[in-house]
Image: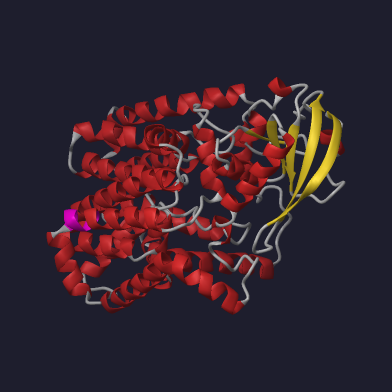
Amino acid sequence: MNLDKCLNLTQHHITGLLLAVCGLRLGFLFANNLELLGDESYYWDWSRQLAWCYYSKPPMVAWLIGLITRLGGDSTALVRIPAVLLGTVFLGYFYATCQAFYGQRAAALGVLLMLAMPFNVLANILMTIDPPLNCFWMMAVFYLRRALFGGNQYAWLWAGLSTGAAVLSKQVALFLPVLLLVFLWQDPLRRRYLKCEFWLYLVPVIICLLPLLLWNQQHDWVTLAHSQSHFEVAVAPTLSLAKSLQQCMEFLLLQCLLFTPIITVFSIVLAAQLFFRFNRQSAETRFLLLMGPLLLLAILALSTLQKVHGNWPTPFYFTTVILLCGQWQTGHWQTLVKRGWQLGMVMVTLTYLLPLLMPVVVPLLGWQNSQLDPLARMHNWRELALSVDAYRQKTSASFLLVDGHRYLTSELAFYLPDHPTVYRFEKTGLVYSQYEVWPGPIEQLGNTALIISEQADNAISPALTAAFAHVTPLGIIELADKSSHYYMYRAEQLRYWPPLHH
């Protein structure tokens, strides 16, 4: 793969490249047989009851899925189409932002580097919270650059709208106005923007944030409680040095798999170098540093204290890669960047080939029923739904009830032929998912339920058993690959629905 030729083609045919990438991803969606991830089906279930917020996340992902499925129907590929479209818009804004800072050739390199990262495949095919967050985050950076360094007054409003959309996608976007405030405060030439322009930017953000706060105030602040549960530093005991290093290395390994090893190392090294010389950098460089690289270093430090999910720092890489492209253009690291891009293209190609490779590789390496199979969570849901539907027809149950994980609940709701409402019982009596925020099957009092459990016989919670007049075991569903067992029960005459503990 010749990087120079690809750079020339990208510079002169960027629109064609983006359309080709979009077409490739759309073709991949309709050609593969991968079922929805648990998160995807969970967000799809949200989309059937549109709201201003949900248990763990703001509403954007549900709104987008709801829009496309109401137009085209509930199919696996259609649920994922917004991810492809948002990913294409993201690449366009990324190119435009990088070009505005460092020119057309650096922007071409930036797009090629993005396309050579496995995360860009996953985050633009799987419809989770990441595609809208990434897209709107990049849009916000683009318009903030035009406002701060291009003197465009209207860009402040567009930046605010983009940031508001990002906040409606994921809570981490609240860093954007905070970091902008820090940048304006430390830059004497632009501190004047705090008097007026910053507030023009902030108004749309506040307007988008207010419904989230109101919804949470009406629902016991469940989203805030869930967000706090991700950060164990304040409550966890002090970790040993060995455990801290292990967690950090696991995080770095995930970053290398998602963003390629060379780009991950470059990003961290570059962020550290520029951070220690922060005051000597140009205003543009300080802005880019604040909008990503410094947060990347903060996440790296956090990984020594607690478990950090691999996708958390994704938006922090965007301006980091832009800075890397600026460094490359001045002659730094050109050979290593080239090698990083080539390695990334190999990794991306393998990512696209996973649906073809895994059925051969998994049995060969003995990875059946293990976490080493990267596609394990995207199989068997249709098979399970067909088996559950057969039990439902035999028992003439009025409703379905899951005694198990929220993913089991949402996958059954999606893959059962009629997309029924599937209820979930939480044995702790606490709110651990959106299913506990929604009311239980109180309109089904007196009716018969089919219970699907991940627990063996006689292991159903006594609180659930007591809610019915009689519960009878029916049988066991064993998947064809013997990866999981599900236990079926007929529960007659729902007498009440166990209340939650608040």
Which residue is pictured at 41% across the width and 32% down the height? 70
237 vs 359: above or below: above
Please identify the quarter of the rendering in which residue 11 is found: bottom left
Q: Write the start and end of the magenta stretch as one range.
A: 14-18
Placement of the C terminus among the 4 image quadrants: top right
The answer to whether residue 262 is left or right of residue 91 is right
Please identify the quarter of the rendering in which residue 431 is found: top right
Q: So how many labels did they put on this image?
A: 0
Of the pair 155 and 29, the residue shown nearer to us: 29
The answer to whether residue 192 is left or right of residue 406 is left
Which residue is pictured at 43% across the width and 54% down the height? 314
Evaluate whether residue 263 shows in this view: no
Of the pair 423 and 202, the residue shown nearer to us: 423
Evaluate whether residue 96 shows in this view: yes
Membership of 444 in magenta stretch: no
The answer to whether residue 56 is left or right of residue 279 is right
Please identify the quarter of the rendering in which residue 484 is found: bottom right
Placement of the N terminus among the 4 image quadrants: bottom left
Residue 478: percent from left, percent from top = 71, 57
| Residue furthest left in the image | 12
Which residue is pictured at 63% across the width and 50% down the height? 384
Residue 91: percent from left, percent from top = 28, 52
149 vs 60: above or below: below
